[in-house]
Amino acid sequence: MAISHEPTSTLRSTVLRMTEQMQVTDMHTHLFAPQFGELLLWGVDELLIYHYLISESFRWSDEEYETFWSWSKKEQADFIWQRLFIEHSPVSEAANGFLTVLHRLGLNVGSRNLDEYRKAFASRTVNEQVDAVMEAAGVSKIVMTNDPFDPVEQKVWLEGKGGADPRFYAALRVDSLLNDWPYAVRELTQLGYEVSEEWTERTREETRRFLSEWVDRMKALYLAVSMPGDFAYPVEDHRNRMIDEVMIPVCAEKDIPFALMIGVRRRVNPLLRSAGDMSMRSDVSAVEALCRRYPKQKFLVTMLARENQHELAVLARKFRNLMIFGCWWFLHIESIVEEMTRFRMELLGTSMIPQHSDCRVLEQLIYKWGHSRRIIGNVLADKYERLQASGWQVTDEEIARDLDDLFNRNFWRFLGRE
Ligand code: FIX
Ligand code: ZN
């Protein structure tokens, strides 16, 4: 469907202007507050070696994967720049996004001079860059992805410094508890929790204690996990026991949602490392069963396969404890963001969270939100124009309310933290 809408009506230009100006809560990212040091990725080379661009660049090269991984970040970035920007036009979403970032930060995209861009970024401190990027992206609140087993992160939290920047919020990631239990057992044991691979009463209690203590330590807004598409519920397996006997009770005790991101097939090409993950269809009925069984528990859910999106949006009509969010990963491309936003709005009105960025590198906030804002604003304007044609006039206050719901309040309200 066409994204440009000409001629631009007054209503549309008002909506687009207000959409541009609306500050956003980014409810799922892989960014970190500055006090996490090296975990906060930023700058030209990090932007270029984003895993989305790594996999795209190999489509144009016979280079051995291991050779690429043996290079420095700068060498990897040079390789990607050459393949995706110089030898071919950067029309993919992620490649285009890199140029959107440079452009919005005032660099001369036309010069095609990578070293000039590197120099411009090198003259900034990380704190200046966080301020400048959040301002340029119109993002005021960022939710991180926090793994208590990551040694760098763990240290910051244990020293009590994790919450130092009030613009950044924590989300406690529980992937290994659900998807790699033997590894989790080793990590939990190191942290002093008495757990075993065998599912015993003591293990259950200790895993609950771990989650409960770390939710408090991080002031985590929610628990989160990425699941493969074959995640099934209810069935007799480790994941189900962990959800029923640990995750749900802890979420209930702390009064926080459980975020499920479903439909990843990890490492289909292991040689590509983090760039080697694939999407996979999921069974929406697992979410249905969870929502029905735990009506008081809130679930934030996104799925990775395009094929699941409509069914998931319909399910959200049935369960108010289900909040669907974002156009995740391979869905975060112009055409699909438009398609998903449109039918979600047609099925749910404004009662959903249309986007999250999933940024791994700070400056990506600029392009991911820049591109999505324009699409979401145009879809909303289409809907208002239809109302207008029936004689229903939306006021500026109502437009601001709706945008605030979509970009902020639906999330905070769902958390009960308005
Ligand atoms: O599991 C996740 O949170 C995914 O978003 C990531 O693992 C993924 O690598 C990513 O960056 C997608 O955008
Ligand atoms: Zn993510």
Image (spheres, rainbow, N blue to C red):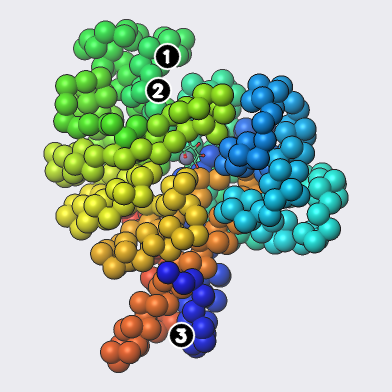
Which amino acid type corresponds to the residue marked 2 in the rendered image?
Ser
Residue 176, numbered circle: 2
Neighbour tally class for label 2: few under 14, some 14-19, many 20 plus, Cα within 10 Å = some
- In the rendering, at what x and y percent does residue 212 appear? 35, 27
* Dot placed on the residue nearer the N-terminal end, 3 or 1: 3
Marks 1 and 2 close (CB-CB < 8 Å): yes
Assess mark 2: CB under 8 A from ligand 1?
A: no
- In the rendering, at what x and y percent does residue 116 appear? 85, 50
How far is mark 2 from mark 3, CA to CA?
48 Å
Residue for point 76% across, 49% down: 86
* Dot placed on the residue nearer the N-terminal end, 1 or 2: 2
How far is mark 3 from mark 1, CA to CA?
55 Å
Give SS at disc 1. helix
- In the rendering, at what x and y percent does residue 182 appear? 38, 12
In the image, is 15 to the left or to the right of 232?
A: right
Q: In what quadrant of the picture does the C terminus appear?
A: bottom left
Q: Is residue 96 above or below residue 359?
A: below
Query: Residue furthest toward the bottom?
Result: 391
Residue for point 71% across, 43% down: 83
Q: Is residue 1 above or below residue 154?
A: below
Residue nearer the viewer, 273 or 118: 273
How far is mark 1 from mark 2, CA to CA?
7 Å
Which amino acid type corresponds to the residue marked 3 in the rendered image?
Leu
Which amino acid type corresponds to the residue marked 1 in the rendered image?
Tyr
Q: Name the residue under label 3.
A: 11
Q: Quadrant of residue 223?
A: top left
Q: In what quadrant of the picture does the N terminus appear?
A: bottom left
Q: In this view, does 74 lie above or below 184?
A: below
